Image (cartoon, rainbow, N blue to C red):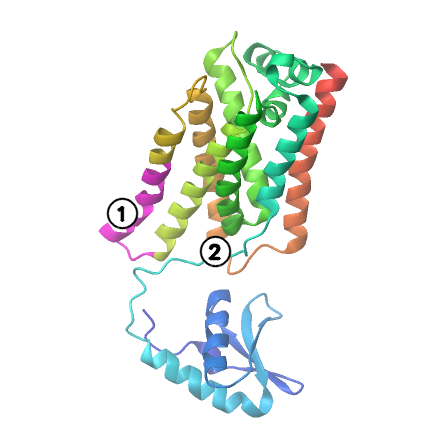
Amino acid sequence: MISSPPPAHQHPVQRSGFVLLRAPHYHKAHEWMFVLRSVGLDGVVRPTLDGGWGVQVVEEHAARALENLKAYEAENRDWSPAKVRRAPLYRGSLWAALIFGSLALFFQTTGPAKLQSAWFTRGTASAFDILHGKPWQAVTALTLHADALHVLGNALVGTLFLSAVHRRLGVGLGTLAVLLSGLLGNLGNAVWYGAGHRSIGASTAVFGAVGVLAAVQALLNREECLAGTQERMAFGKPLVGGVALLGLLGTSGTNTDVYAHLFGFLAGLMVGGGAGLVVRRREGPLPDWLQVGLASVAAVLVLGAWALAWWVG
């Protein structure tokens, strides 16, 4: 609840020909920008020198802008944001489709599992091998599929959930989080079975994406809802939804590796919890250079795992 206009109204920052109206946070700056544009004033969101955010307006329009913002804040002073959820921080993109589309293309190289090409010999996740010096198989197995139907199903469902993760975390952080979830899920699966178990497929990472999304949304809900019963309910809904999806999609079909899906989901909750803490403490999206760096780390993990598979395998 806002009891008075923010200090930014009272302490605008003067610049040559412009005035920067300080906002409490990134989202409020964007809100003010739309308010000003609705009354015919042009405003642009700009970062401040101390790491904050504000709306830059032409100096001659500063007084009118302040007047409109004060009136807007006064009108909305007693409005309760209990049911408001933060909009996704990042725009939709085609990267999720491209990532899973590359798995379909890779299938054209590896062929189906029944042909037992060298790709499957070296890259299949063998519980025994993973626990005895070949942990890279936890990554390579995510890129292998038994047949065309297998890769098509994972590509379609994976694109859906990875796109949602990208909307919350960005392409770089989101991709790395899902990959780590799949990796950890396969490691957990290997520990669970001990030996004599082999698995392939991106579905471990797909359910990792479900876990990441549930954890991130739960943390953001907890941050933005009112305290009390409503907050606890909002915190739990994404987790319940994630478990429901795991039960609905993760236990159906023939030759389904249920424990791989379960461990992928649990790993996603863990990784997503860490990523969610990072996101909810920020007032704006991660910088592009960092997203590119994180995406590069994910690419290096996959390519490096395959390099080890061929070099040591």
Q: Is residue 224 above or below residue 296?
A: below
In the displayed orientation, state which residue is furthest to the left.
229
Q: Residue furthest top?
A: 196
Residue 228 seen in render: no
Give the residue pinned by disc 1.
233
Q: In which quarter of the image is the N terminus?
A: bottom left
Q: Quadrant of residue 179?
A: top right
Q: Which residue is drawn at 55% across and 79% down?
A: 43
Residue 239 painted magenta: yes
Q: Residue 5's spot in the image, x, y percent?
A: 39, 79
Give the CA distance from mark 1 to mark 2: 21 Å
Q: Sort mark 1 into few (<14), some (14-19) or many (20+) by Cα contacts within 10 Å.
A: some
Counting other residues with Cα less than 10 Å from the Cα at mark 2, is it few (<14), some (14-19), or many (20 or more)? some
Q: Nearer the viewer, residue 37 or 291?
A: 37
Q: Is residue 283 left or right of residue 301?
A: left
Q: Check disc 2 and report the residue beneath it.
A: 88
Element carrying mark 1: helix
x, y (%) of residue 187? Answer: 53, 21
Residue 62 included in the magenta stretch of the image: no
Query: Residue at the location (39% across, 24% down)?
Result: 252
At numbered mark 2, what does the secondary structure look like: helix, strand or loop? loop
Amino acid tagged 1 = Met
* Principal secondary structure, stretch drawn in magenta: helix
- Residue 32, can we see it? yes
Q: Which mark is first along the chain, 2 or 1?
A: 2
Q: In this view, does 300 lie to the left or right of 45?
A: right
| Number of the front mark, 1 or 2 | 2
Give amino acid for label 2. Answer: Pro
Q: What stretch is highlighted in magenta?
A: 225-242
Q: Are marks 1 and 2 in contact (CB under 8 Å)?
A: no
